[in-house]
Image (tube, rainbow, N blue to C red):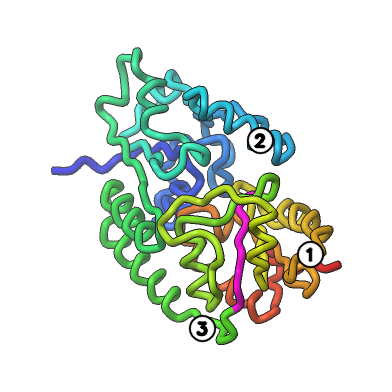
């Protein structure tokens, strides 16, 4: 018989969101430093980043690149606290070492401790596409003992995704997950663009986001640019998007088609919010702002 965990540790924001969607918030016993769901206030925080999140985008990119080249983990886990909580389930991810804790970091944190990890199930979420996100939801629900509810939520998300009405004009869209230097959207983001009716000019579904440069972007000259920098909400992404307005050699800038979105809520996290993100994209491709979720920047 499978043991149903009564204490769950979530080490990434998307997993925390999914756990609360599954009605399991009361069983979440600890979270990462970047988990911002309202229900986690006051819970133990088990991680920290070695990168200063208050630095400029260029400085953050430099620090991340140097750490990766050196083989240094970007996050640390409080192994002693993890051991003290003694969870039955620890949820992490293997999609992106820049975004959140990976299984290897957890293992390093508790390697010399006698307690929880050998007994706990460590579940690594791996979804790199919309279908993959729904698969992760089902796997997480099963691990937490609510498999039927997971199936219901996945089916409802798929139905809502399928119901999105795409624009018919097929504008050429560039999504930016970082601005300085520019990174184009990957994983499920190209699917969001396509579902909304756009033509995704950089990136492919299920493939990592990637670095580009402004010379290449100028050659592509997309009709629409959407700034959705990973780890940031609407206000900060609007500020990043505003910096693009000086690039008057770009069609999107001159035509007033530079937009910002709430990456945390709708784009950068592999959770059910990506459905809302595709809906928001469909609206902005029609020229409609969604209050609190997208904003258009113009000269």
Q: Position of residue 73 (x, y in %)?
A: 49, 26
Task: Check the image and report above or below for 188 versus 53.
Answer: below
The residue mark sitting in front, 2 or 1, is 1
Helix, strand or loop for the magenta stretch, by majority: strand
Of all residues shown, which one is farthest toward the right?
A: 299
Inspect the magenta stretch and tell me whether residue 25 lies in it.
no
Please report contact status of discs 2 and 1: CB closer than 8 Å, yes or no.
no
Distance Cα–Cα, label 2 vs label 3: 37 Å
Instruction: Judge left or right: residue 33 versus residue 79.
Output: right
Residue drawn at the location 58% of the way across and 76% of the way down: 282
SS assignment at label 3? loop
Tell us which disc is closer to us: 1 or 3.
Answer: 1
Q: Position of residue 2 (x, y in %)?
A: 18, 43
Question: Mark 2 — residue?
Answer: 60
Instruction: Find residue 165 and name its label.
Output: 3
Nearer the camera: disc 2 or disc 3: 2
| Disc 2 element | helix
Residue 88 at x, y percent in the picture: 31, 35
Residue 177 belongs to the span the image colors magenta: yes
Residue lying at 80% horizontally and 71% vertically, measured from the top left: 254
Callout 2: 10 Å neighbours few (<14), some, many (20+)? some
Distance between mark 2 and mark 1 Cα atoms: 27 Å
Tell me the crowding category of disc 1: few under 14, some 14 to 19, or many 20 or more residues within 10 angstroms, Cα based. Answer: few
Q: Earlier in the sequence, mark 1 or mark 3?
A: 3
Q: Residue 286 placed where, x, y %? A: 65, 81
Quadrant of image for the N terminus: top left
Nearer to the camera, 220 or 33: 220
State which region is magenta: 171-178
The residue depicted at 79 percent of the width and 66 percent of the height is 297
Residue, disc 1: 249
| Residue furthest out toward the bottom | 168
Q: Nearer the viewer, residue 279 or 68?
A: 68
């Amino acid at each position: 018989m499978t043991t149903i965990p009564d204490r769950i540790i979530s080490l990434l924001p998307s997993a925390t969101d999914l756990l609360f969607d599954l009605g399991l918030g009361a069983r979440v016993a600890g979270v990462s430093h970047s988990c911002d769901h309202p229900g986690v206030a006051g819970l133990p925080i088990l991680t920290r980043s070695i990168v200063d999140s208050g630095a400029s985008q260029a400085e953050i990119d430099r620090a991340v690149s140097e750490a990766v080249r050196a083989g240094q983990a970007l996050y640390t886990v409080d192994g002693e606290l993890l051991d003290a909580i003694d969870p039955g389930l620890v949820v992490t991810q293997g999609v992106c070492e820049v975004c959140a804790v990976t299984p290897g970091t957890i293992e390093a944190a508790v390697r010399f401790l006698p307690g929880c990890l050998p007994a706990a199930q460590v579940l690594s979420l791996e979804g790199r596409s919309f279908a993959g996100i729904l698969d992760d939801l089902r796997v997480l629900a099963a691990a937490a003992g609510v498999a039927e509810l997971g199936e219901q939520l996945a089916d409802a998300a798929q139905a809502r995704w399928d119901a999105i009405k795409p624009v018919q004009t097929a504008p050429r869209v560039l999504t930016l997950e970082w601005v300085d230097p520019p990174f184009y959207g990957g994983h499920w983001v190209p699917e969001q663009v396509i579902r909304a009716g756009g033509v995704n000019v950089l990136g492919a579904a299920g493939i990592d986001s990637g670095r580009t440069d402004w010379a290449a972007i100028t050659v592509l000259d997309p009709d629409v640019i959407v700034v959705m920098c990973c780890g940031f909400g609407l206000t900060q992404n609007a500020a990043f998007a505003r910096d693009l307005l000086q690039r008057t050699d770009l069609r999107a800038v001159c035509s007033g088609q530079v937009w910002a979105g709430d990456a945390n809520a709708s784009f950068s996290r592999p959770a059910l919010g990506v459905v809302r993100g595709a809906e928001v994209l469909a609206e902005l491709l029609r020229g409609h702002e969604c209050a609190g979720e997208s904003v258009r920047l113009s000269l």
